[in-house]
Image (cartoon, rainbow, N blue to C red):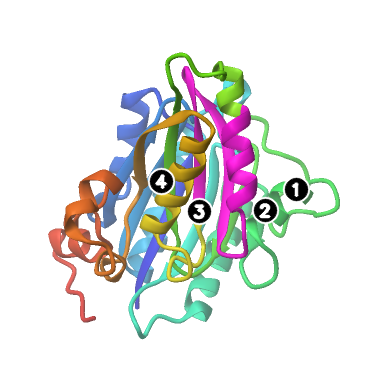
Amino acid sequence: MLTECVINISEGRDVDVIRDIADQAEATLLDVHTDPEHHRSVLTLGGQTDSIEEAARSVMSTAVRRIDLGDHQGVHPRMGVVDVVPFVPLGPTGRIDTAIDARNRLAAWAGSDLELPCFLYGPERSLPDVRREAFRTLDPDTGPSTPHPTAGATAVGARPLLVAYNIWITVSEGSEFDTAGAVGLARGIASSIRSPSVRSLGLAVGSGAQVSCNLIEPHATDVATLFDTVSHLVDEAGGDVERAELVGLVPRELLTGVPSHRWAELDLSEEKTIEGRLASVGVPVGW
């Protein structure tokens, strides 16, 4: 079965470290997205499930060896050097139970071989649940009961496709908002757009702010609708939307409902589709 694995590592500044970790994915690597403000990189892997599992192990082993969470500072929440590892079934025949099996095998291996505490998420609990409760009311599902001394802990998941999307906010010249006010605005907007289909945070980024979103039901709330809603709220408050950014890849079908003349504005393109990247590495896509 074709599977996607989206590995989030807590390194967004040292290009040599990022390259070394990404190289471990070899032919399964579809995309690397790096953000120095978040101090985070998102590696998208794709292919047959067994190949993805093997590549994920290599990526995780190298990340644990190369990164120390002790001196990590970034605006994005994190609990470990390999922060999140979700498995995602692809295509109409993709099955969540196959992704769950892959998740469970990887977590068992990481807990044993890397001595890395792993928390499972998916049908039984959400990723926000894990972030809130880890080492408090929730014990690791595999590995030690306390955080790894340099690598922290990892959330290993199985989930449907989602779209990660960021929108930058800047302060208009002469606006009542200073940088702190822009961050407050971003947080307020993030709160107002949050819903069962959208998870969102308002973050301080450079001299401005960012509304950082996960569209967990991208058919219910699409990228264009989200962008237009945020733009309207920012404009009403006297700010500006600087730019939007797709983090990782998007299913091709989500482009069909967006007029092509808006793709550049929304940071969308055929080259940023899962299907396009799979084809570029020689993986046939039958849907």
148 displayed left or right of 156 = right
Residue on which the image places disc 2 = 128
Alpha-carbon distance for marks 1 and 4? 26 Å
Q: Write the residue at 18% across / 62% down.
A: 276
Q: Write the residue at 69% across / 71% down.
A: 124
Of the pair 190 and 204, the residue shown nearer to us:
190
Identify the magenta region: 184-213
In the picture, the disc for residue 132 is 1
Q: Amino acid at mark 1?
A: Arg
Q: Amino acid at mark 4?
A: Val
- Image quadrant occupied by the N terminus: bottom left
Residue on which the image places disc 3 = 214
Alpha-carbon distance for marks 3 and 4? 23 Å
Q: Nearer the viewer, mark 3 or mark 1?
A: 3
Q: Amino acid at mark 3?
A: Asn
Instruction: Say few, some or many: other residues with alpha carbon within 10 Å of mark 1 (under 14 / 14 to 19 / 20 or more).
Output: few
105 displayed left or right of 25 = right
Location of residue 217 with respect to 201 vertically, above or below: below
User: CB atoms at circles 2 and 4 under 8 Å apart?
Assistant: no
**The residue tagged with tag 3: helix, strand or loop?**
strand
- Nearer-N-terminus badge (3/1): 1
User: CB atoms at circles 1 and 4 under 8 Å apart?
Assistant: no
Of all residues, the one furthest to the right in this rendering is: 137
Q: Quadrant of residue 283?
A: bottom left
Q: Write the residue at 64% across / 73% down.
A: 123
Instruction: Say few, some or many: other residues with alpha carbon within 10 Å of mark 4 (under 14 / 14 to 19 / 20 or more).
Output: many
Q: Quadrant of residue 4?
A: bottom left
Alpha-carbon distance for marks 3 and 2? 12 Å
Alpha-carbon distance for marks 2 and 4? 24 Å
